[in-house]
Image (cartoon, grey):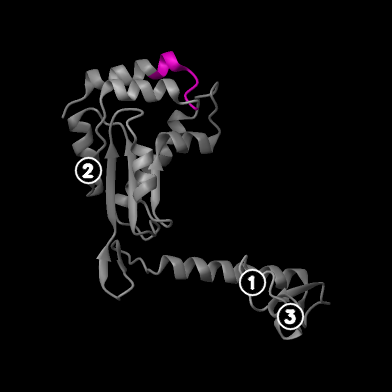
């Protein structure tokens, strides 16, 4: 019962889930119900969400980039630079291997978040600035980077540029290997890639520039 304001909404002490939603001992049991004002009800559910996130994350990041795992052992945060040709499968690889609490840094996604559309690409400089700020935090193992793993997705065909980034971030490289033909075929069949001619030219240029 909320003592600050009149009650407005019923709150279930045992949180409703798809498994118990039809259980009247949970949904209609007076002992499982309390009357809260709207603000208090929101606050209770916010705390439940945060608690669930903390339990799922099960880690505490320290200032130097280490965290405690489930067994209480200290583990280093790991950084991966996932590189390869456009349409080689970098994003798919990261999606299949990352944890829900991991950080993923992808220049294309940063540009989209800032407002880029198919006909609007004027956010590149701002996106590069955001990415470099994140790189700086990662390189310093800043406590703001609060995760087990960081996945950096980039094309990086030039060996020098690639190695500089890997060294800067103290990262592990992961090369997503695919042939030029595979990348071109995926580009042609990817509905998200609207300008096929441009995208295919970018793929061709990457293979021309690539230094193993």
* Residue bearing the label numbered 1: 20
Residue range highlighted in magenta: 192-199
For marks 3 and 1, the one nearer the N-term is 1
Label 2 to label 3: alpha-carbon separation: 53 Å
The answer to if 203 sits in the magenta stretch is no
Discs 2/3, front: 3
**Residue sitting nearer the eye, 9 or 186:** 186
Is 112 located above or below residue 105 in the figure? above
Q: Which circle marks residue 78 in the picture?
A: none
The picture places residue 109, in percent across and down from the top left corner, at: 46, 37
> Tags 3 and 1 in contact by the CB under 8 Å rule?
no
Q: Residue at x 30, y 28 (%)?
A: 85
* Residue bearing the label numbered 3: 33
Mark 3 burial class by Cα count in 10 Å: few <14, some 14-19, many 20+: some
* Residue bearing the label numbered 2: 173
The picture places residue 39, in percent across and down from the top left corner, at: 73, 69
């Amino acid at each position: 019962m909320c003592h600050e304001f009149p009650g407005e909404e019923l709150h279930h002490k045992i949180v409703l889930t798809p498994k118990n939603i039809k259980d009247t001992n949970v949904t209609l049991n007076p002992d499982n119900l309390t009357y809260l004002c709207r603000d208090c009800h929101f606050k209770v559910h916010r705390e439940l969400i945060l608690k669930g996130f903390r339990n799922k994350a099960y880690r505490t990041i320290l200032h130097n980039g280490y965290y405690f795992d489930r067994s209480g052992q200290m583990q280093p945060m790991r950084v991966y630079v996932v590189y390869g040709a456009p349409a080689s499968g970098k994003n798919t690889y990261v999606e299949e291997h990352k944890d829900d609490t991991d950080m993923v840094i992808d220049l294309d996604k940063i540009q989209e978040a800032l407002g880029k559309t198919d006909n609007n690409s004027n956010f590149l400089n701002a996106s590069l600035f955001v990415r470099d700020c994140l790189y700086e935090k990662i390189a310093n193992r800043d406590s703001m980077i609060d995760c087990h793993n960081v996945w950096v997705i980039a094309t990086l065909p030039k060996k020098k540029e690639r190695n500089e980034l890997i060294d800067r971030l103290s990262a592990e490289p992961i090369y997503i290997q695919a042939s030029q033909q595979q990348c071109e075929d995926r580009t042609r069949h990817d509905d998200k890639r609207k300008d096929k001619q441009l995208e295919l030219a970018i793929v061709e240029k990457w293979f021309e520039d690539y230094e193993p």
